Amino acid sequence: MELEINSKSSTEDSNDIDENVNFSHVTVVATRWTLDFMFVSLCRHFKEEKLEEFNETLSTFEAISQSPSLKGAIEDKKLRICAFLARVMHAKELDVQFEVDDRVMPLMSAAKTWADLKDTVADKSLFKNITVLLLVQSVAVCLEKGQRSSASSALKWFEENHEFPLSMGVKLTTIVKQRETYHPFLMSFSFRRLRETIQSYLDDFLEKNPSDYLLKAATKVVQLSQNTDSLGDVMPRDSCLTETSINSTEDTKKKKNDVRLRTKRKLLSTKITDVWKPDSCKKAVVSIKRISEHEIWQMTSERSVDTSKIQKTRKKHQKWTYQLDKYLKDGVRRHGQGKWSRILLDYDFEGRTGTMLKDRWRVLMRAHEVS
């Protein structure tokens, strides 16, 4: 009997909503709550270093973010933060691209995105620390992967695009030349320290911009389900019964008032360009669209860029120049054929690997340019 009464009450409440509230406004509020929940989930997966769960949630977050109702500045900031986190999560996958320029590796792209988040960081020293950690780790990851030439290219890119102490540049240049993967300087600016510092930033952002309304409501439902066989025993019940179980009558009334206040907010129209999808030239990675430097500039200056549908492409073929061929010939003459790793240490082959050197040498031999 009580269930019938609750069902009748639920139906009446539903009719009241249809008659008194614009359903599109209700959809806006629900969509924003859902986006907030996905954002908090991404931050949690980042903290727990769960890459697979992070990528799955990121796909959902991307789909929801396309809603035309998400037009505020806070949503724009959350999109940028997710773009930044995606790059850091893929930091050690050097073949993953987030930029049109195939020389820009994940942490280098993260540094560009981080610069656009400066206005979200209250502690300026924290902003500076993360900037320096991104620089050091961009070099350290390359050395860790055995790619000295890529480390040199990363350092050169930072010198051209970011400001940092001259002494640090000299120190890193020496480390790269000596190929000291476990140098104490790199250990003091470790990848673990980078993640922990970013987590401090996320904690501060979430404290100032709470996004846990839906999370708290779902938590209460789960707590109620602990006394039943499964969560499904709670979820199928009518919304009025569940809501009454979660909150008191006074809390429910307050929630409805909050909905009315939210629906009065004016949401400006804007479409945010997807900023978190990389392309991978070697292996399948979660679909995370890349963004060009021009698109980032448009987002930071106008915040009203139409989403561009960028097709996934493989990493562009790197053309062998006369100078690179000369390096290869000199290296073989000095160390002998097959000593590709040694040859990589002596010359800057712009990110090429030993396998690429071997393939190029075969091409030169077939063309009778070498004996």
Image: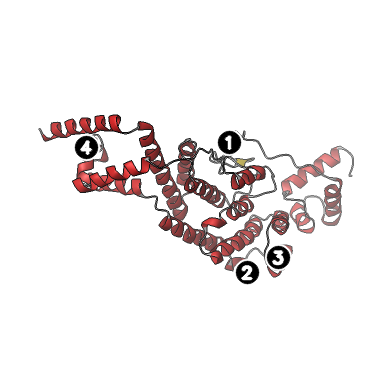
First of labels 2, 1 by sequence position: 2
Q: Disc 3 designates what residue? A: 169
| Residue 168: image location, x then y, percent | 68, 67
Q: Disc 1 designates what residue? A: 306
Cα–Cα span, label 4 and label 3: 63 Å
The residue under label 3 is which amino acid type?
Answer: Gly
| Residue 208: image location, x then y, percent | 42, 57
Cα–Cα span, label 3 and label 2: 12 Å
Task: Report crowding for label 4: few under 14, some 14 to 19, many 20 or more residues within 10 A (C-alpha).
Answer: some
First of labels 4, 1 by sequence position: 4
| Residue 43: image location, x then y, percent | 45, 52
User: Total number of numbered labels?
Assistant: 4
First of labels 3, 1 by sequence position: 3
Residue toward you, 143 or 61: 61
Quadrant of the image for the C terminus? top right
Residue 286's place in the image compared with 120, above or below, is: above
First of labels 3, 2 by sequence position: 3
Q: Disc 4 designates what residue? A: 240
Q: Looking at the image, do the residues carrying marks 2 and 1 touch, with CB atoms under 8 Å apart? A: no
Cα–Cα span, label 3 and label 1: 38 Å
Cα–Cα span, label 4 and label 1: 40 Å
Q: Nearer the viewer, mark 2 or mark 4?
A: 4
Cα–Cα span, label 2 and label 1: 43 Å
Q: Nearer the viewer, mark 4 or mark 1?
A: 1
The residue under label 1 is which amino acid type?
Answer: Asp
Q: Which disc number belongs to residue 185?
A: 2
Q: Does dot 2 land on a helix, a strand or a loop?
A: helix
Dividing the picture into quarters, in which one does residue 35 lie? top left
First of labels 4, 3 by sequence position: 3
Q: Nearer the viewer, mark 3 or mark 1?
A: 1
